Image (spheres, rainbow, N blue to C red):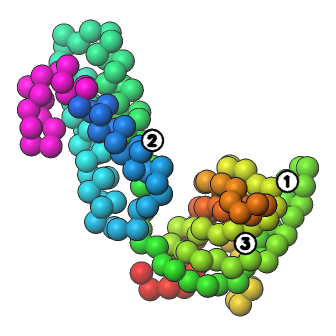
């Protein structure tokens, strides 16, 4: 028997339950509504339990079929990917003017915009120039002239040519100088 969420399962049902929970979490993350820290912490703990139990089964059950072994590895990988999508801290609504810079091999763009939501690790904002997930950008606070580098973690086109995007900062924990 394998315990998950205070309930015991046989291997077959444990694997099915894990896949079901991963699918539920994946759908929740698509909504990008992670404002509640307690909910984020609960999701993180639930996913970590799936990883821990799947790993334990993989290491302690010597009679696993190749299919079960592959499924457990897939569950650990998927849960790990989802844990990486959980917000690491609270968000704050603000209105801070910034200048966003994109310098790539085929284009150089700069634009002034307002940051509307911030965290210790990044920001969400809108811009009008073409940008893709994975691109490196620089951002400067207009009020303090401080700069930070970041990577585009998500982007989606809305309202015509406006692109909404999420940036994760490199090496800066409190660029916004807020008390968290």
Can residue 100 be seen here? yes
Q: Where residue 151 appears, x then y in whole percent?
A: 66, 57
Q: Where residue 141 appears, x then y in whole percent?
A: 71, 82
The residue furthest front is 159
Q: Residue at position x 70%, y 56% from top?
A: 157
Q: Please tell me the numbered disc located at residue 81.
A: 2
How far is mark 3 from mark 2, CA to CA?
27 Å
Which is more toward the observer, 124 or 69?
A: 124
Q: What residue would you read off at disc 3?
A: 139
The residue furthest bottom is 143
In the figure, residue 103 lies in which quadrant? bottom right
Q: Residue at position x 44%, y 86% from top?
A: 179
Q: Residue at position x 71%, y 63% from top?
A: 159
How far is mark 2 from mark 1, CA to CA?
28 Å
Q: How many marks?
A: 3
Crowd rating for badge 2 (residues with CA inside 10 Å; few <14, some 14–19, many 20+): few
Q: What residue would you read off at disc 1?
A: 104
In the figure, residue 129 lies in which quadrant? bottom right
Q: Where residue 87 appears, x then y in whole percent?
A: 43, 60
Q: Which residues are magenta?
A: 1-16
Say if 17 sits above or below 129 in the image. above
Say if 74 sits above or below 162 in the image. above
């Amino acid at each position: 028997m394998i315990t998950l969420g205070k309930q015991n399962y046989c291997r077959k049902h444990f694997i099915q339950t894990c896949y079901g929970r991963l699918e539920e979490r994946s759908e929740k993350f698509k909504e990008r509504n992670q404002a509640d820290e307690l909910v984020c912490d609960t999701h993180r703990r639930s996913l970590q339990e799936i990883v821990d139990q799947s790993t334990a089964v993989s290491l302690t059950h010597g009679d696993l079929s190749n299919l079960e072994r592959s499924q457990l590895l897939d569950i650990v990988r998927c849960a790990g990917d989802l844990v990486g999508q959980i917000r690491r801290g609270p968000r704050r609504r603000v209105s801070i003017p910034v200048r966003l810079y994109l310098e790539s091999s085929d284009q150089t763009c700069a634009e002034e915009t307002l940051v509307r939501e911030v965290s210790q690790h990044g920001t969400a904002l809108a811009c009008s120039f073409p940008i893709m997930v994975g691109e490196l950008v620089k951002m400067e606070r207009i009020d303090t002239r401080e700069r930070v580098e970041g990577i585009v973690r998500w982007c989606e086109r809305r309202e015509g040519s406006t692109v909404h995007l999420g940036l994760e900062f490199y090496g800066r924990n409190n660029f916004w100088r807020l008390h968290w």
